[in-house]
Structures are given as C-alpha cells and as structure tokens.
Image: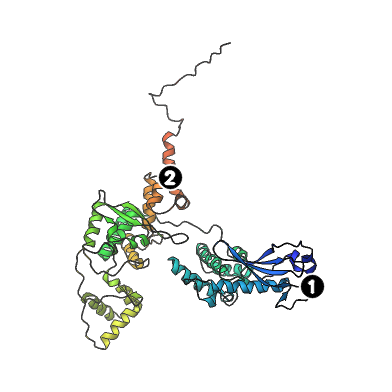
Amino acid sequence: MPQKLKAPSLETRNARLKLPIIAKPRFVKVAPGASLGYRRNRAAGAWVLRQADGKRGNHLKNIGLADDFDSADGTTIMDFWQAQERARELARTELASVANPTSPPIELLVRRLTMPAALEIYEKDLVVRGGDLANASRLRGHLPPDLVDKAIGEITAGEFLLWRAALAGKLSPAGVNRLMTIAKAMLNHARAFDVTILSSRNWEIGLAALADAAVSRNVILSEEQVRAIVAAAYKQSLEFGLLTELLAVTGARISQVARARVVDLRGSDMPPRLMMPSSRKGKGKKKVTHQPVRLPTALAAKLAEFVGGRPANTPLLLKPVEYQRVSGGPQPVWTAARLERLAQLLTEKLSFDDIAAELDTSKSAVAGILHRLRAREVIEPAPEPPPTFRQTAGGGPWSKSDHSRLFARAVVEAIGEDYPERVTIYALRHTNIVRQILAGVPLRVVAVYHDTSVGMLERHYSHYIGRQDDAFARIDLLDLAVPPARDVISLAPRRRQVTL
C-alpha cells in the first residue's frame, strides 16, 4: 500500500472547520504532478484534484464533498483519507489518457509498476531516445528475485540495500556502481508513470554508490608494443589491421571509429584528417558532432585505397567477410582453405569448442557444416577474398564486441601471454592519451581531441599529469649545491634615501 500522507489541518473535521472561508483551496501533494485540495465553504467543504497538464500548467477537478457535517460514505462524501485515495486513482486515469504514441502501453501505466515492468518501459524509452539498449540488458540479468513481484512504491530502503549487498558479492565495486546507476535511472523514469511512487528516497539511500570503487587500471603500452600489436593485427586481416592502426593513431573509442563514414575521410587535406564522430556517452540524446583529427599520410593513403569507389555515406571501415553476422551470430565463409583446415582439425579429434576457437567462429557454425558434410551434401567452396585494399562488400560495420578475440590474439603474438595486465583494445586509447600528456600537449587540447573532459583526464591520468608538471617545475628549481652561473649579475640592494 502507498504511504498515507499527513496534513494536520485537513485530516479531521474540527481542524478543517477552523480554516477561513476562502475560494482558493489548500493543497497537499499526493503523487507526482497531482495534489489534493480542500476548499472551505459556508456549507460542507469540497475536495479538489489539481493535476499537471505537462505544459507548465494544471487543471482542477472536484472529486466530492468533505465530511464536515455529514458522515462519509466513500462515494460523494469523503473524509481526508478516502479523498486521498480517490485523488490518486483519478491521477492515474488522467496520466493514461494523455499518453502519447511513443509512450508505453496504457496497461503499464494504470497499474502499480514492478521492477520488470518499469524496466520494460525504460527500455522502450531508450529506443525512442537512441540510448544504449545494453544498459537494460545488463540490469535485467541482475533483478532481485524476491522483489520482482513487488510494487516499486512498496520497496523499502533496506530491501534496496540488501539487493546492493548481494550484488557486491558477485561483481566488482565499480561494476556494482555501474549497475546501480542504471537501476536508479530506471526507477526515476518509472516514477513519472506510477503515481503511487511518492519519493525516490528509498532507492537513493539503498542504491547509493560504493565509496572508492573507481580504481584506475589503465594499461599503458610502449611504442614498440603498439607497433608490434598493429603488425600482428594486419597479419590476421587487412580490415582488422586498419581498425587497430586507426585506434592506435587517434586514441578514439571503437564506437566512434565504427560510425565514421567514407565522407569523413579528408585524405586530400594537408595534413590528412578524419572527421571523427563524437561519442554518445552522457545523459539524454546527444547530437553527434565531428571533430577533425590528424592522420599520418601513409594511413590516410591506406584508407583511401581501402575505400575505393564506395558511396560517401557507407562505413569507412568494414569487418572481414568471414565475420558477417547472420541470424545474430558470426558465420564463416567456408572457403576451400577453411574447409581443408576443418578436415585437418577433425583428424586431430578436437572438441567442438577447440575447433570453433581455432577457426574463430561459433560451435553452431561448425555443427552446421559438419551436418551438411555427413549428409554428403555437395558444398561448393566460396572464392578466396582478393588480396587487395579495395573492399566493396565486406562484412558490415564493426560493432563493439567483434574485435575482442582478434585483439587478444594480436596481443599474445606481439607481447606474449605472460604480460602482467589484461590488455584490451582500449589500451590503445589510454596509451595515446598518455603519449600526448607527456609530450606537453595542453590538457584542454587532449580532452577535445579524445572527446572527453579535463576533469576525466585529471581523475584517471593524474599520475602522468604529475610527471609532466614535475618536468616543468624543475626548469626553475633552485639548487644551492650547484654554483651560480657566471653570467648572473648580483644586484646589491640600494640604500633607501629619505627626504625630510
């Protein structure tokens, strides 16, 4: 049951009759955007609902008489508590009647929302705003089983706190904080659709962020290691090599590079540039802008040759044909060389997992081709992709997870398996940022170039900023153990003359 609001001046008959007789009602908030009012009359007073119209205005509606002189019947004559419940019911009906076409179904609006229902509404809103749907997916897998059937307005701060404690035993502190941020965004969004949710206080307390959870684990690579990783990436495929080199040179996020179009490449400029799309990090639906970033001449030439004559609005970078997504998963193109390799692996009596890992595909793809082979179905090998920079079809644009296994192989080949830190493709971004900081590039320029803020740089790269500042501070450091330079002239203080 929602919490009953208290208003001493309106709760009892005697308290209401002491109020002055005026036309303007006295209001108390009963739900977001809805207030219950009492208008004192010479006869029995009246209960009034004030409902926000979503246009910075509101409208009033009489909902019944107060039990100032007659006993309450719950229909036409109501006491304060009955009027409060009636106001909430009418507010829910009004909210459903003004739902716009992009709003969730009405049946989700008129009932008390549970967390799964609120998550469904939040996911629909992410679609409308162009947000990251992965946020809803992450949260769906961690909803508390003992709270899924309970209305959000009835969940206490202690129950939210127990949920956070249970997650702390499964996830890292930073992972818990990321999930709690998504949960609070979902709950705040649900509050606008469920008038029984009176306050966000319970989840603000129970889902508060864990302290000292953000531990910077940025992996910084040497220039030799970056060069070796890029070379290993080119050995796997031209497409992956171009992706890796562009990330290493620009320090951009893979989501930015994946959205770059052919028209964004300005190879004829001197120096060559790429109009890098901005990221979509942050609140709300951000307008995508483009920031020019410099490119080496050799890389710009490779990209121009790779683009060939493709239309200007097509993706700049493409996945290899082998990673074209079919039916929701990566499917290989079974060339003659790949079929020969499959036959060789089968003679070694490896498991499906090992065969799939060796061929860099899924177990379902291996099972499918083996089923066709055992059925003695004739399989025409696909032609080998031409060894040229030009790619007209390709495997579609890169997504944020297509590179994971490819980059892991490149790292193992370049710097070995015994490297003390787990190196992901994001290490190329960290390395590029630190490279510019140590080179003395102003932090504001580094922030703009990498589509971030100076505050984020100071938070995550303070150690390297301190090293740079130390180098500048030592330029004029006074060292008394070193004799002064001969060309330094000592100026004796002149005696001050005072005229009387």
* Label of residue 69 in the image: 1
Residue 29 in picture, x, y percent from top left: 65, 65
* Element assignment for label 2: helix
Q: Quadrant of residue 351?
A: bottom left
Rendered-image quadrant of the C terminus: top right
Q: Residue at x 46, y 68 (%)?
A: 126
Question: Of discs 1 and 2, which sits in the foreground?
Answer: 1
Residue found at x 36% / y 60%: 256
| Residue projecting furthest to the top | 500
Q: Nearer the viewer, residue 205 or 91?
A: 91
Position in image of residue 119 (x %, y %): 51, 72
**How far separated are the C-alphas under marks 1 and 2?**
80 Å
Residue at numbered disc 2: 467
Can the viewer see residue 280 in this picture? yes
Q: Position of residue 115 (x, y in %)?
A: 55, 73
Q: Which image quarter: residue 412? A: bottom left
Tell me if 392 is positioned left or right of 496 in this view.
left
Q: Say whether residue 134 is visible.
A: no
Residue at 79% over, 72% down = 69
Residue 473 horizontal side relative to residue 366, left or right: right
Expressed as whole percent of the image width and height from the top left, the position of residue 144 reads 56, 73
Disc 1 is placed on an element classified as: loop
Residue lying furthest front in this view? 42
Q: Are marks 1 and 2 in contact (CB under 8 Å)?
A: no
Q: Amino acid at mark 2?
A: Arg
Q: Mark 1 belongs to which amino acid?
A: Phe
Label located before the other in sequence (1 or 2): 1
Q: Dot 2, how many residues are within 10 Å of its Cα: few (below 14), some (14-19), or many (20+)?
A: few
